[in-house]
Amino acid sequence: DAKTTQPPSMDCAEGRAANLPCNHSTISGNEYVYWYRQIHSQGPQYIIHGLKNNETNEMASLIITEDRKSSTLILPHATLRDTAVYYCIADNAGNNRKLIWGLGTSLAVNP
Amino acid sequence: DAGVTQSPTHLIKTRGQHVTLRCSPISGHKSVSWYQQVLGQGPQFIFQYYEKEERGRGNFPDRFSARQFPNYSSELNVNALLLGDSALYLCASNLYAQETQYFGPGTRLLVL
């Protein structure tokens, strides 16, 4: 079973920030939180990842709570092209690595 | 730079047949992983290879096998195809076994 839970769907207005939550209360101390998105059954696209600290790149920001039990992916100015399924994954990035994916959040960005 | 490439893009097979899917990683990447994604579900991990050795295996039957070549490309083989094997098969590559995985466009397999 996936170690992460996400809401099945969300809506966002174009130009507004999209805040996608993820719960990972059973995450281990050495597991990273990774975010990917998938558009129209194409290959998943890497967005961002983090361990303890908040992270930001050209695509998004990742806010991880201090207890590491949850995180939020922020798309600061959502566009129609951000409509996709967003996956939050706990990754041990270890020798016996197995990425376990849940169902993700289907984000609809509306004009 | 070229990303992860997979071939073929689409494939139709009948039950009982065998299929070989191919993946070329990003140049310089030494690790390749395979995932199966059935419609409406998240990807499911099948295998990870690093430096031609299997580093991880998901909960799939022995009908599924893979290998990695000296140039780091990889093949996924599925024998005795079942209808339930119909899915999008994804390949991901990363520089080293523990680092961020980047995905290819996938191969869509339909088993009739």
Image (tube, grey):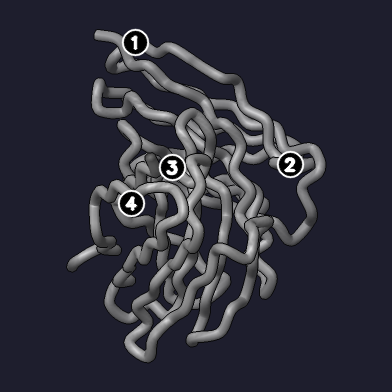
Measured in 3D between alpha carbons, the distance from the residue under mark 4 to the one under mark 1, in whole angstroms, is 30 Å
Mark drawn on residue B106: 4
Helix, strand or loop at mark 4: loop
Mark 2 lies on residue: A1
Indicate the amino acid at tag 1.
Ala
- Residue B10 x, y percent position in the rendering: 25, 48
Q: Amino acid at mark 2?
A: Asp
The x, y position of residue B68, in whole percent, is 44, 81
Number of numbered discs present? 4
Q: Subunit of mark 2?
A: A
Count neighbours of disc 2 (C-alpha within 10 A) and say few if under 14, some if 14 to 19, many if 20 or more. few
Marks 3 and 4, Cα distance to the nearest angstrom?
13 Å
Dot 1 falls on a residue whose secondary structure is: strand
Q: Pointer 3: what residue? A: B86
Foreground disc of the pair 3, 2 = 3
Question: Which numbered disc flags the more N-terminal residue, 1 or 2?
Answer: 2
Q: Residue at x 47, y 78 (%)?
A: B67
Most foreground residue, B93 or A54: B93
